[in-house]
Image (cartoon, helix red, strand yellow):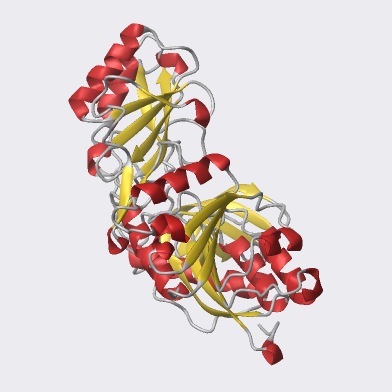
């Protein structure tokens, strides 16, 4: 075990934002609060044969990239908010670390290097989080309700009165929300508030384990009118969410939650429990970057796999001849079709160029893949699990084209990822087994102050004599 008097030199950061060092015995030590280049002493909290977890207790040489955290609730101490991991690291250095994680993942997991590293997509590091799940807990000993993120490495809710990464108007609601929930008769049966903010509407989804009494509903309506928010109620799963009547801006006819993609003159309505990107400003830039990399032409057919609400599908449809959006949920497919209809006025003919279908993308086969027809280009935007079944089916068709006579693989694939490990796994299949090369890749800093790495990669069909070469 690492001795408390031993000074360790931090070499890098891991995917959890912890410093990585080696002690005198050569054992890897993961250190909360330490940054690359620093010399630290640590207190070991967990020890295994090949690694240890520790917390920094002394700092002898400080990194030039260490900064003062922007939030008073960030830290290593007991009770500190665990929503952010690396506020003590300069935002530009955070992006550099994430780019290194992407490059290392591609090399170590897929044995490939990209032809070109793209300039990182980054933006404001505060006030960016338009989606969040806030825990609620009535603490009897304190005689108060806490609303916020969990404490670092704990199931307890942090005692936070503000949040630097939430939009300022939402951060300002944390204390009023605490007072509101404390005033409610069923405060012990309200475990969660989910935030979903659009460009004009802020929705709060209240999870309640028992039906709310009329007095509590009246309190919610009064809060909505005072603070200009919508309340939605969730009794069970996401499908049980309903709008609270008579709350501010809660008319069934609007306004509704929506975000804009101004470069494409599109408006994207969504329900409060739908998946949308946490950071809408970065999403705008990401969509624009993805479409420039895809370079869809007016005579081309494109397939958007894992299309969601049409975040990429509809922008592509403003450029391409035809777009097929594929998603696993019939509900999302229906909403995507509705979004296409709502944008028809701004883009006449949009509805004719785009089509949405539901498929189980985690059980894809070569035959199902070929059934949706050949496309000139693909956009792939999977969840954290990646697109293994889809890519594997593509690789199988490359190895045995006779399974789908006449089917032609896409010339280009743009892959948007929220997990560098599954991106690397799928990239390895594309490059080594499906006949592509990784033409470009880069990081997207969707979640500043966290260790979460989002990225985008471009795969071009390799010439026959180079197929499978990394």
411 relative to 314 in the view: left or right: right
Q: Position of residue 173 (x, y in %)?
A: 26, 32
Q: Position of residue 208 (x, y in %)?
A: 46, 19
419 relative to 241 in the view: left or right: right
For the C terminus, which image quadrant? bottom right
For the N terminus, which image quadrant? bottom right
Residue at image coords 37%, 18%: 142
Q: Position of residue 269 (x, y in %)?
A: 36, 44
Q: Position of residue 329 (x, y in %)?
A: 58, 43
Say above or below: 411 vs 95: below
Q: Nearer the viewer, residue 233 or 260?
A: 260
Residue at image coords 37%, 36%: 195
**Res. 94 in view:** no
417 relative to 167 in the view: left or right: right
Residue at image coords 29%, 31%: 253
Q: Nearer the viewer, residue 143 or 60?
A: 143
224 relative to 119 in the view: left or right: left
**Res. 355 in view:** yes
Say above or below: 187 vs 113: above
Q: Nearer the viewer, residue 66 or 172?
A: 172
Q: Nearer the viewer, residue 365 or 66?
A: 365
């Amino acid at each position: 075990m690492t001795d408390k008097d031993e000074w360790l030199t931090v070499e890098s950061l891991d995917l959890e934002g912890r410093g990585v060092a080696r002690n005198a015995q050569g054992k890897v030590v993961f250190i909360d609060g330490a940054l690359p280049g620093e010399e630290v002493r640590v207190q070991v909290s967990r020890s295994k044969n090949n690694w240890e977890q520790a917390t920094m207790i002394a700092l002898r040489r400080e990194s030039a990239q260490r900064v003062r955290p922007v939030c008073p609730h960030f830290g290593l101490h007991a009770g500190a908010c665990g929503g952010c991991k690396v506020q003590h690291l300069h935002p530009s250095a955070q992006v550099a670390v994430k780019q290194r994680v992407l490059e290392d993942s591609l090399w170590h997991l897929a044995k490939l290097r990209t032809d070109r590293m793209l300039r990182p997509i980054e933006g404001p590091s505060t006030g960016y989080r338009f989606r969040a799940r806030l825990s609620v807990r009535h603490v009897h000993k304190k005689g108060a309700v806490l609303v916020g993120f969990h404490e670092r490495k704990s199931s307890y809710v942090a005692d936070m009165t503000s949040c630097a990464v939430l939009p300022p108007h939402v951060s300002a609601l944390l204390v009023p929300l605490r007072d509101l929930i404390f005033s409610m008769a069923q405060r012990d049966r309200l475990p969660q508030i989910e935030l979903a903010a659009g460009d004009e509407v802020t929705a709060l989804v209240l999870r309640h384990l028992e039906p709310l009494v009329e007095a509590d509903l009246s309190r919610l309506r009064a809060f909505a009118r005072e603070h200009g928010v919508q309340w939605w109620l969730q009794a069970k799963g996401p499908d049980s969410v309903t709008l609270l009547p008579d709350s501010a801006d809660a008319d069934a006819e609007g306004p509704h939650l929506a975000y804009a993609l101004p470069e494409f003159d599109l408006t994207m309505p969504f329900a409060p429990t739908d998946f949308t990107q946490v950071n809408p400003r970065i999403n705008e830039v990401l969509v624009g970057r993805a479409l420039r990399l895809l370079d869809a032409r007016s005579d081309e057919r494109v397939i958007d796999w894992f299309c969601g609400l049409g975040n990429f599908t509809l922008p592509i449809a403003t450029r391409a001849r035809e777009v097929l959006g594929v998603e696993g949920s019939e509900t999302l497919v229906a909403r995507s079709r509705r979004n296409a209809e709502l944008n028809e006025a701004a883009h006449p003919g949009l509805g004719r160029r785009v089509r949405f279908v539901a498929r189980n993308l985690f059980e894809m086969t070569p035959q199902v893949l070929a059934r949706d027809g050949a496309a000139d280009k693909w956009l792939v935007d999977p969840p954290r699990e990646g697109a293994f079944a889809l890519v594997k089916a593509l690789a199988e068709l490359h190895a045995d084209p006779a399974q789908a006579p006449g089917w032609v693989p896409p010339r280009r694939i743009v892959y948007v990822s929220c997990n560098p490990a599954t991106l690397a796994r799928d990239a390895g299949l594309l490059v080594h087994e499906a006949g592509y090369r990784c033409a470009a890749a880069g990081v997207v800093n969707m979640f500043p102050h966290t260790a979460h790495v989002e990225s985008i990669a471009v795969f071009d069909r390799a010439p026959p004599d180079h197929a499978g070469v990394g």
